[in-house]
Amino acid sequence: MKPFKSATVIITIFIGFQALFALAEEQKAYVKHVFDGDTVLVRLGWKDEKVRFLGIDTPEKAGPYTKKEFLGEKASARTRKLALGKTVTLVFGGNKLRDKYGRLLAYVILPNGKSLNEILLMEGLARAYKRFPHKMKQKFIRLERTARGKKLGIWSAIRNR
């Protein structure tokens, strides 16, 4: 085979594997860094990727682009404790694979099989993100409602409406 043809074949195979990888519904990933309560850096296959937790929004911690919000540090610390240095399963279940910042959107399943997204909601360290559709949207809304009713976490400082 001529060098040009073999390079073309190799590139075509590589692109095919990338497309197959991107379409997989779940992937194992190693959590290398926690940016905040709902965003982590993972090693996914052969590259690092930022992952935004699908369907939830945690309070912000102080940063170069964000103001500190109530319990932002606690949400970040909880994510760090549960996920940092562990191999998790990323489950893709939204209508998009990436957000407008290029981060992967995924549910994060811990090694014990529990959903980190759900844990943060149940502990009152996250809100259900209602703006975009995803598979767990109704469940997340119910979990938020329960935490709010119990006045847990971020809901402890808010009166019931």
Image (cartoon, helix red, strand yellow):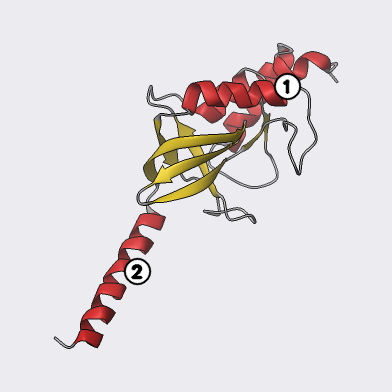
Local packing at callout 1 (Cα closer than 10 Å; few below 14, some 14-19, many 20+) is some
Q: Please tell me which of labels 1 and 2 falls first in the chain.
A: 2
Q: Amino acid at mark 2?
A: Ile
In the rendered image, residue 114, in percent from the top left (x then y), is placed at 44, 24
Mark 1 lies on a secondary structure that is loop
Q: Nearer the viewer, residue 141 or 11?
A: 11
Vertical comparison of 123 with 102: above or below: above
Quarter holding the N terminus is bottom left
- Residue at image x 74%, y 13%? 151
Q: Nearer the viewer, residue 80 or 89?
A: 80
Residue where numbered disc 2 is placed: 15
The type of residue carrying mark 1 is Leu
Determine whether 21 is above or below 31 in the image: below
- The vertical placement of 131 against 114, above or below, is below
Position in image of residue 158 (x %, y %): 83, 18
Q: Residue at x 51, y 27 (%)?
A: 116
Seen as rendered, the residue at the extreme left is 1
Point out residue 161 in the picture as x, y percentages from the top left corner.
86, 20
Residue sitting nearer the eye, 132 or 56:
56
Q: Secondary structure at mark 2?
A: helix
In the rendered picture of this protein, how many numbered marks are placed on residues?
2
Position of 88 with respect to 137 (left or right) is left
**Neighbour tally class for label 2: few under 14, some 14-19, many 20 plus, Cα within 10 Å:** few
Q: CA distance from mark 1 to mark 2?
A: 43 Å
Tell me where residue 117 appears, x and y as whole percent. Answer: 55, 30
- Give the residue at the far front of this rendering: 64
Residue at 71% x, 26% y is: 72
Residue 71 has which mark? 1
